Amino acid sequence: MFSKDRPASGYSQYRNAGPRPSSNEDTLKTETIQIERKTFVFSLKENPRGKFLRITEDVSGRRDTIIIPAPGLVEFKKIVDEMVKVSSESPEESEQPEQPE
């Protein structure tokens, strides 16, 4: 049974907890892009634990963020590059099974 005094899931209590306390983060570079109704902010940051990329999506004031540690950026880029390649193919090309070499 759920109490009115506590959230139904552990996740929701953190989701609306408000701003986090400030940490020792230095911003190395920030870029912002607008795609349709969404704004994406890419911030390369550094803290005592290392460098990381924070990607924030803002849609009408609702924000979601992912953080990628710098050592994973090359692999992350490979996957994004592959997704871009597949998305730009014509539907006929992407529906055909790959031919063995």
Image (tube, grey):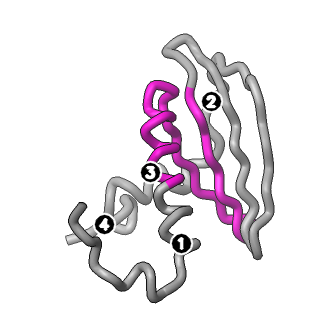
Task: Say which residue appears at 78% left-offset and 37% top-offset.
Answer: 30
Among the two numbered marks 2 and 1 on one chain, the one whose residue lies closer to the N terminus: 2
Seen as rendered, the residue at the extreme bottom is 92
C-alpha span from label 3 to label 1: 12 Å
SS of the residue under disc 4? loop
C-alpha span from label 2 to label 4: 28 Å
Q: What residue is shown with label 4?
A: 3
* Residue 65 inside the magenta-drawn segment: yes
- The span picked out in magenta is 52-81
Which of the two marks, 4 or 1, is nearer to us in this view? 1
Seen as rendered, the residue at the extreme top is 48
The label on residue 87 is: 1
Which of the two marks, 2 or 4, is nearer to us in this view? 2
- Relative to 13, residue 19 above or below: above
Task: Say which residue appears at 26% left-offset and 69% top-offset.
Answer: 2
Do the residues under discs 2 and 1 have CB atoms within 8 angstroms? Answer: no
- Relative to 76, residue 83 above or below: below
